[in-house]
Amino acid sequence: MPAQGATSLRIDDPALIELLLSGEAKPEERARAARLLGLDATRELRVLATSSPGSATRLLAKALPGQSIRTATIGRVGAVLCQSARDTTSLSDHLNEVIVDEFPASAHSERGPWLGIGASVAVLEAPTSWNQAQRALRFASSTGFGRRAIAYERLSLLEVLADIPVERVREIDDVVRINQIASTAAGAAEVDTLEALCQYGTLRRTATELHLHHSTVAARIQHVERSMGWDLDDPIDRFLATFALMLRRVSLSATELAGG
C-alpha cells in the first residue's frame, strides 16, 4: 500500500486504459474498466497525452503528489488518466513549469516530454478527453521553446489548425522558408532565438533566458527578419512570426509523433 500522500501509479493495466478511452467500447465496458482501474466514478477524469510516457510519468508523480494516476502507451503516444481537482489553467501552467524546470530549454540538453491536456469529464466520457488531449499534443512544443504543456480548452479558435493535414502545413510558404533557415546549424540557432523571443517578449529577456549577449540575440533576429521580410517591431509581423512558428511546431510535432 502506498504511503499516505504519495502518488498512486499503475502502469500495468494498458488494456483496461485502452478500453476506457475507446470511443467504440460500450458504456458498460468502459464502466467496468474504470472500476477495475480503481477510478472513482463520482469524480471527473482528465486525460493527458504525452510524447514520452516514461519521463512524463515520473514528472507527473512529482507535479501531482497525492493524485491517483494511471498510464499506458497507445501507439506512439502515452495516455495518462488523472482525477485532479485543479482547474485547466492552473494545471496546464503548473505542468509546463515543472517540465521547463526539469528540462530547461537548451540545444544541448534533453528536451523532455510534451503534454496535451484534455478537458475534465465524467469517467464514461473519457474518450472525449483523450481525443482532445491528442489534438492539443500537436500544439505542444517539440522544440526547445514554446509551451511544453497545452490544454485543449485554452486553444480556443486555434484548435481548428489541428484539422489541417500535415502535408498542407509543410507547403505553407512561411513554414517552408522557416524550415529552410533552420536547415543549417546557424539558422537553427536563429529560429530557436526567434521562438524564444516570441515566448519571452523582449530582446533583453530573451538574451537573459538564453544566456547570450543582447547583441547576439539582436543579430540573429535581424537575420531572420531580413530573410522573412518581417519587422518584429510591427504588431502584425510579430503575429505572423508567432503564427508561422506555431504552424511549424504543429508540423514537427505531428511528424515526430508519427515516427517520421
Image (cartoon, rainbow, N blue to C red):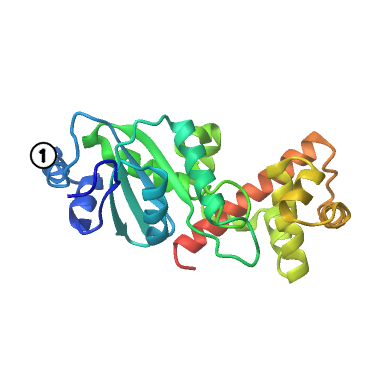
In the image, 105: left or right of 91?
right
What residue sits right under mark 1 in the picture?
Answer: 28
Residue at coordinates 69% horizontally, 59% vertically from top-left? 176
> Can residue 167 be seen by looking at this rendering?
no
What x and y, as percent, mark residue 82? 31, 41
Q: Residue extending furthest front?
A: 3
**Other-residue count near label 1 (Cα within 10 Å), few / some / many at <14 / 14–19 / ≥20:** few
231 to 13, vertically: above or below:
above
Residue 23, percent across and down? 24, 44
Expressed as whole percent of the image width and height from the top left, the position of residue 105 reads 62, 56
Foreground pick, 158 / 53 = 53
Q: Quadrant of residue 129?
A: top left
Write the residue at 55% across / 64% down: 110
Q: Is residue 190 left or right of residue 154?
A: right
Quarter location, residue 217: bottom right
- Residue 169 is left or right of residue 123, and the answer is right
Secondary structure found at label 1: helix
In this rendering, would 97 be left or right of 173? left
| Figure label count | 1
Whether residue 253 is visible to the viewer of this picture, yes or no, is: yes
Closer to us: 23 or 144? 144
Tell me: residue 98, above or below residue 254.
above
Residue 231 coordinates in the image, percent (x, y): 85, 44
Task: Work out whether 13 lies above or below 37.
Answer: below
Residue type at tag 1: Glu
Write the residue at 73% across / 70% down.
185
